Amino acid sequence: MTGRDDADDAVPPTPPITRTPESGEGGEGGLFDAGGKVDREAIYRQHETRSDDDTPVRVRLELTRDLQKRLDRYLVDRIPFMSRTALQRLIDEDAVTVNGRRPKASTRLRLGDVVEAVLPPPPSNEIPPEDIPLEVLFEDDDLIVLNKQPDIIAHPARAMKSGTIVNALSWRFRHQTSGGLSTVGEEFARPGIVHRLDRFTSGAMVAAKTDTAHWRLGHQFQDRTVDKRYLAIVHGVVRRDQDLIDLPLGRHPRIFDRYAVRHDEAGKEARTIYRVRERYDGFTLLELQLLTGRTHQIRIHLSEIGHPIVGDDYYGGRKLPRRAVVPKRAEADGRSSDAPLMARQALHAARLEFDHPIAGDRRVFEAPLWTDVRGFLDALRAHRDPSPVESAETIVDIDQASGGG
């Protein structure tokens, strides 16, 4: 129930469902062990390999015997790595249905009943705190919103156990503010992480401090009621003022850790709206609105229309030295023309809008551009003949004060 650097459309895709009968044999899809119980490591792999973070991992359990057992006790038997309290919380947060209806923990199960449950990675290990600076846009007892810096990942992974947003948040809550990250996802080193941004993407990112806030925010991402807007500087002059890119995406058939347009059964619907904010000689500033939430969606879609993001060498972009934009004669401060102007992908999550999970009111958070993207934008405006485009549908303030970096 998380998201990366993309949002979604109004109709959620069918989530992965694995089913097992009550008789005890393993289920389809690989989420169950030989005894018919949900396998912890299989859930981890499912969460890590999804191409859409906003699609939950579900299991489907069908009773072939009349157990006359309470729902919460049944789930304890079937999902042994989660406590009864944690499973009751899933039920309270509408993450469990019986025959398609919202049940109570005390609901008695009978022959033929079908139980479906959304499974986050369950709680366990503490994350070591690390004193890593964070730019905080907002914080209260329930959540924290950051202007994420580039070159940092959201949570520890197999290849990187420290130096992440989660490590930094753990230190902040212990030494600077109060509270902690939600326990949802703690088992696999991602407590509190409701959605993610790519390592080199900067901008607005929300994390949950309580389990209730986490589940309610997760529902909003899943139901696609969160509005996420991005800014990107791309190679080339984009001719149309706005357009919808509608190309299905899936894992790259040959290159590990990359994604691609897929017109086969592996492709999932992916839709991006771009709107031109400014044109320059050789470059364009775009505001992007995501209608689906696939991994690397913005980056692949823009590359596919012939306008890769500057600095995104995964998908056809180029890292730029200063001389690529700034004439040598214009360097008044003696900086080298070979110094990097844009050394990472020029992509920034500029705006995040959602309902506060506890207060209920609509909140808008805007993340100022980090100084590298701001410096690139200023250089384009100074040396590449800027041409602004007016549109009533663009809402990001591109001229607010810069963020950190």
Image (cartoon, rainbow, N blue to C red):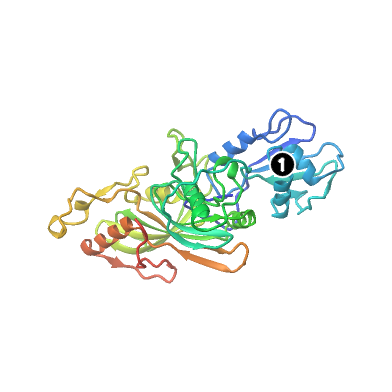
In the image, 130 versus 399, the foreground residue is: 130
Instruction: Say left or right for 213 vs 239.
Output: right
Residue at (79, 46) in percent of width and height? 71
Q: Secondary structure at mark 1?
A: strand
Q: Position of residue 67 (x, y in %)?
A: 86, 39
Q: Position of residue 350 (x, y in %)?
A: 42, 61
Q: Quadrant of the C terminus?
A: bottom left
Question: Is residue 400 placed above or below 218 in the rendered structure?
Answer: below
Question: Is residue 176 placed above or below 56 in the rendered structure?
Answer: below
Instruction: Say left or right for 400 vs 207.
Output: left
In the image, 320 versus 279, the foreground residue is: 320
Looking at the image, the residue that sits furthest to the front is 175
In the image, 334 versus 99, the foreground residue is: 334
Q: Position of residue 75 (x, y in %)?
A: 75, 42
Q: Is any atom of residue 36 visible in this view?
A: yes
Residue at (50, 66) in percent of width and height? 364
Q: Amino acid at mark 1?
A: Arg
- Packing grade of label 1 (10 A; few <14, some 14-19, many >=20) is many
Residue at (34, 60) in percent of width and height? 285
Q: Position of residue 140 (x, y in %)?
A: 55, 63
Looking at the image, the residue that sits furthest to the left is 329
Residue at (43, 51) in percent of width and height? 298
Determine the image quadrant of residue 281: bottom left
Q: Is any atom of residue 292 visible in this view?
A: no
Q: Which residue is mark 1?
A: 60
Instruction: Say left or right for 4 vs 33.
Output: left
Instruction: Say left or right for 403 vs 84.
Output: left
Question: Is residue 381 placed above or below 134 in the rendered structure?
Answer: below
